[in-house]
Image: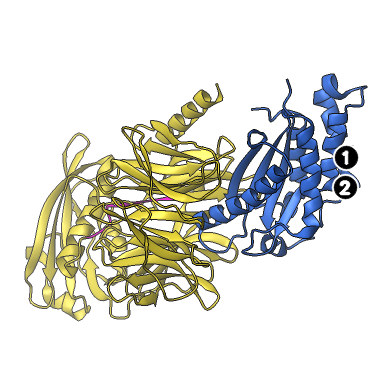
Chain colours: A yellow, B blue
Amino acid sequence: MRKVVWLFVVVASALAMPAANAQLVIEITRGQENAVPIAVVPFGWESANAAPFDVAQVVAADLQRSGRFAPLDRKDMIDRPTAGDQIRFQDWRYLKSDFIVVGKLTPDGGDRYSAQFELYNVLNGQRLTGQRLTATTGSMRAMSHRIADIIFEQLTGIRGAFSTRIAFVSAEGTPPKQQYTLIVADADGENQQKIANSSEPIMSPAWSPDGQSLAYVSFESKASAIYVQTLRTGERSRVSARAGINGAPSWSPDGSTLALTLSRKDGDVDIYTLKLQSQSLTRMTFDPGIDTEPTWSNDGRKLYFMSDRAGGPQIYEVDVDQPNRATRVTFEGTYNARPRLSPDGKQLAVVHLDRGNFRIAIVDLQSKGVQVLSPGRQDESPSFAPNGATLIYATQDRGRGVLATVSVDGRVQQRLAASTGDVREPVWSPFPSGR
Amino acid sequence: MRAAQLMLIVMSGLALASCKSKPPTLPDASNQPEETSADTGRTTDTDVSGRVDPNEQLKQTAIQAGVIIYFDYDRAEIKPEFVPIVTAHAKYLNTNSANKIRLEGHSDERGSREYNIGLGERRAQAVRRALMLQGVTEAQITTVSYGEERPAVCDRGADHDGQLRRRASGSAGE
């Protein structure tokens, strides 16, 4: 009976609730010194009433957050061109902007609008790109992120990740009376939605490869169980509630299978794969040590995971067609855990014990070299942006759990703190499908 | 019919050290039984009132022996000073196969979360094995590891008693 009620609650909250309680505030803690100066001029709007949305502001904020660009302050703009033929390049050269974005927003009738934007090189006056995009009032922010994606890719050669989302867990209240919420937000922390909510812990969210669903662990039935929930509909199913641990879900690249951690009755903590359609379970590791935190190789043929079979936690890999034949991957340091593969498949992000501090590090799979990226003492849960340029992870700030990002070269760092409570276990979504 | 369920909290000593205010000493039995009976009085009159139930007495003895077992950091062996707790609980569980126990594993908050779930499970399993060596059957024991997810005890001492009360009074007969 209780289960039925629960499903209901979750569905209702998933559809209805913007999670205003855990608003994220972004602070750039370290930027790139040679960030490229760019002017993003406020978009034109030819109508008596106010413009329905400030596209340029979202575009500029995205570019700034990447750490690679330094947008020109609006109050320093001496002119407001809205199309290429209105740009007096000399003025912008004088303002030391290397690039300029101009555009205008026009009503298309009803709730529809279109945005026409252009990107120019200020130094030589060359038009680099330009596009016309359409949106409704509700999708204006998403359209602005797409414009930022196009500009970012044009100027850096790297696909922009501004249209992606993050999932994370928030915990509010003091122990033991805590409320745990699984939240999905845009990559800039806006547009938050509650996905699940419980007075028992929620942990280990994982995106399906199509970005439509999340798998996660919930203790709502007073024991751990893994759930899969479709974001758009709120529909969810319990895919594993076996005796002992049900943890660390990770989707295979084709979305058909979850890797997960079970301890079953005998308490041996090992990794299994679970085919979601047939529910068939295959054991991947057989070691008496703790084997957990699996993640798939990009071709779906291998699992990387953490094991303390040799004493301390280290990363291993196993071929899914040859379970029980694991080989060790990391050798540097006494603690390497929670592996996540970079989108190009060449590096693992891990939690690494660095002179007494838990930090995010990158392990190069070829050279096995370890590079520490994060500066904290209690950093955990690294997750790559789908373009591989940035990592998001969880850290502590004056005793509170906050999220942070770091560029893979370590040069750009930001912190995302919730207005209240702790936030943790961030996971970056895949690229949105359909483009 | 009522399946009385006890709970043992299994945790790392470092989590204890990280408590700012008064570290919970080993559960001091002095006032727990009164609290327990005072509270169970409301819900379990039918079973307990009037009669001296030997099962109930063994349960109280087990609770008085202690409800928290601390492990050294990164270790999963039960330290000698906690063996009497295990023995007292085993005695209670052995009197009636309907008696149940729930073992909750906890870890400190350092390091990776899912690994900490594994560490909490490993400790809960150590207690489970110790209970089974003393004759407790598999069916009587449930383990759950919270790792670092639900901070154990610290100031939860009071609440833990609350939970224990609820469980002992049978409302946890799920």
Question: The disc numbered 1 marks a residue on which chain?
Answer: B
Work out whether residue A181 or residue B133 is closer to the camera in this orientation and state it. B133
- Please give the range of residues in magenta: A160-168
* Residue positioned 46% across, 50% down in the render: A270
Q: What kind of residue is marked 2?
A: Ala
- Mark 2 lies on a secondary structure that is loop
Q: What kind of residue is marked 1?
A: Pro
Question: The disc numbered 2 marks a residue on which chain?
Answer: B
Answer with the quarter of the image where residue A276 lies: top left
Q: Residues within 10 Å of mark 1 (few under 14, many from 20)?
A: some
Figure check: A212 above or below A76: above
A307 drawn magenta: no
Q: Name the residue under label 1.
A: B33
Decide if residue A325 is on the left or right side of residue B56: left
- Mark 1 lies on a secondary structure that is helix
Exactly how many numbered labels are in the figure?
A: 2
Q: Where is residue A410 in the image (x, y as percent from the top left)?
A: 36, 74
* Residue positioned 82% across, 42% down in the render: B62
* Residue positioned 46% across, 75% down in the render: A333
Query: Which quadrant holds the N terminus of chain A?
Result: top right
